[in-house]
Structure formats: structure tokens, C-alpha cells
Image (tube, helix red, strand yellow):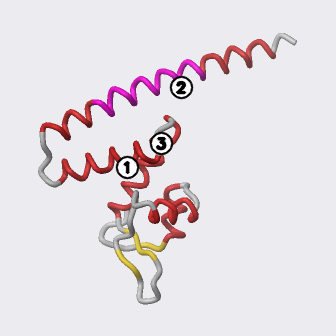
């Protein structure tokens, strides 16, 4: 999508569906640090940054905290740098946890559907 091109925060916000404010906050806390800066000091983002933000965005509906997001990103970074048995186990724990969280969401959705069905009876 981006290739080697760097983009400004506005375009990144459009691509991710996140607000510029949220992206700036993620930069401030170290979740997603821009790949560069323009001559004017504006944040510039690469494809890897987009990928990282999309992962974070997908974690949000599952109720992960910023700390948990940072932990997963650290594990992913460690794995990319050669990884270890610990990083593989951590990824597996996150995968299992994500499945559990998804199951809870599916149950909530089923209850919502049931509620909507009941409303149709009135």
C-alpha cells in the first residue's frame, strides 16, 4: 500500500480510522513512534508504522489496555530481532487470550441479538 513512501499523520489517520490525536498520544507513550520527521518537524510514517497501528486498532475492541498493547508490541519486536522461546510463548498466550476475549464478545453480540428480537415482540 505505502511501499517505501512516508506519509503524514493525516493520511495515516485516514488509513487507520484513528484520530490524529490518538496517533500523537501513541507516539507520546511510545506505542508507535514515527519513522521520521519532515524538515518542518512533522511526523512521517512508514508502512511498518501503519501495520503497527492496525494491530493496535484491532486490539482495542477486545479490551486490551495500553500496557498490554505495549507488551505485545515488545514481544513482536523481540521476535523480529531473532526471537526466543519466551517470545513464542508470549505470542501463544496473547493468541489464547484473544480467543477468549473474542468468545466473550460473541456472547455479548448474541445477547444483543436476542434483545433486539425481544423488542420486535412489542
Residue 28 falls inside the magenta stretch: no
Residue 107 falls inside the magenta stretch: yes
State how far apart marks 3 and 1 are (Cα): 9 Å
Q: Earlier in the sequence, mark 2 or mark 1?
A: 1
Say what secondary structure mark 2 lies in. Answer: helix
Label 2, on which residue? 105
Q: Earlier in the sequence, mark 3 or mark 1?
A: 3
Question: Magenta segment, which residues?
Answer: 93-108
Note whether 2 is above or below 106 in the view shown: below
Kindly identify which numbered label has been placed on residue 65.
3
Residue at 34% over, 71% down = 35
Query: Contact (CB < 8 A) between labels 2 and 1?
Result: no
Kindly identify which numbered label has been placed on residue 70.
1
Residue at 50% over, 59% down = 15
Query: Contact (CB < 8 A) between labels 3 and 1?
Result: no
The rendered magenta stretch, by its main secondary structure, is classed as helix
Percent across and percent down for residue 72 are 33, 44
Tell me the mark number nearer the camera, choosing from 3 and 2.
3
Say what secondary structure mark 1 lies in. Answer: helix
Amino acid at each position: 500500500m505505502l511501499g517505501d513512501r512516508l506519509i503524514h499523520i493525516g493520511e495515516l489517520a485516514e488509513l487507520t480510522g484513528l484520530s490524529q490525536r490518538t496517533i500523537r498520544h501513541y507516539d507520546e507513550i511510545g506505542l508507535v513512534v514515527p519513522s521520521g520527521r519532515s524538515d518542518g518537524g512533522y511526523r512521517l510514517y512508514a508502512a511498518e508504522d501503519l501495520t503497527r497501528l492496525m494491530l493496535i486498532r484491532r486490539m482495542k475492541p477486545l479490551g486490551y489496555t495500553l500496557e498490554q498493547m505495549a507488551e505485545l508490541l515488545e514481544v513482536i519486536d523481540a521476535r523480529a530481532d531473532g526471537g526466543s522461546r519466551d517470545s513464542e510463548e508470549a505470542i501463544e498466550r496473547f493468541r489464547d487470550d484473544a480467543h477468549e476475549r473474542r468468545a466473550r464478545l460473541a456472547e455479548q453480540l448474541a445477547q444483543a441479538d436476542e434483545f433486539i428480537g425481544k423488542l420486535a415482540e412489542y
